Image (cartoon, rainbow, N blue to C red):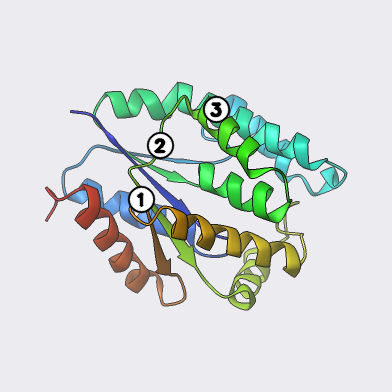
Amino acid sequence: MRGVLVTVEGIDGCGKTTQVALLESWLKDKGRAVRSVREPGGVPISERIRELLLDPSGEGMSAITELLLYEASRAQLVNDVIRPALDSGQVVICDRYTDSTMAYQGYGRGLPKEFIAELNIRATNGVVPAKTVVLDIALSEAVRRRKESGPADRLEGEGNPFYERVRRGFLAVAQQEPERVVVVDGTPNAETVADSVRLAVVQSILDDVD
């Protein structure tokens, strides 16, 4: 049985990591084989790239360098973990994937979207999510949550105009691909959001899970 790739997206502070963990736990309780990963990172090479990307001291990094590092990290993760897990029939839940690159580097940084789309295909070798959940929250709420979580990394240190563009990018992707991408309000408490995430995933691609 071919596995299923589910991705969880949204601006920093939207609650992605919490929802990935809750979805993984719930699916395992239902008897599914699940592997969760994060981007950038997930394997040793990609984790080293993550350190470069998020290090606050790297503020001089160019947009194109940033883009290529994200794609390099992704290529390694797909090769080492995601594709093998899918081939073995697992549900793979990824905390960020290609839509983050389109939102952050395309809409946020203003790099050519067609170029990013081509790089996404190359880096993933055509591995596309069966379902993507975008957790959408107001920018003010995201800022509040990020302040509570500790010091900002390089991306989190970007100003509000950047994050407004990124948020619009995620919503634009959802509008362009409504069958794959579902937008969930990330404002309520974690369990309420988790119910909406489960509903979106189960109804769409895991209809054998009660």
The CA span between labels 2 and 3 is: 11 Å
Q: Quadrant of the N terminus?
A: top left
Q: Is residue 25 above or below residue 50?
A: below
Residue 166 — which label?
none
Q: Quadrant of residue 65?
A: top right
Please state the total of marks drawn on the protein image. Answer: 3
Q: Earlier in the sequence, mark 1 or mark 3?
A: 3
**Residue 149 visible, this orientation:** yes
Taking the spot 52% from the left edge, 47% from the top edge, the residue there is: 99
Image location (x, y in percent) of residue 195: 28, 67
Residue 55 in the image, given as x and y percentages of width and height: 76, 44
Give the camera-side residue of 115 and 133.
115
- Label 1 to label 2, Cα distance in Å? 10 Å
| Residue plotted at (66% across, 48% down) | 106
- Residue 128, labelled with which disc? 2
- Residue 77 placement, left or right of 102: left
In front of the other: 202 or 57: 202
Q: Which residue is mark 3?
A: 123
Q: CA distance from mark 1 to mark 3?
A: 20 Å
Instruction: Kindly check if marks 1 and 2 are in contact, taking CB atoms under 8 A apart as contact.
Output: yes
Residue labelled with disc 1: 180
Q: Is residue 12 visible?
A: no
Q: Which residue sits at x=60%, y=70%?
A: 142
Q: Nearer the viewer, residue 152 or 209?
A: 209
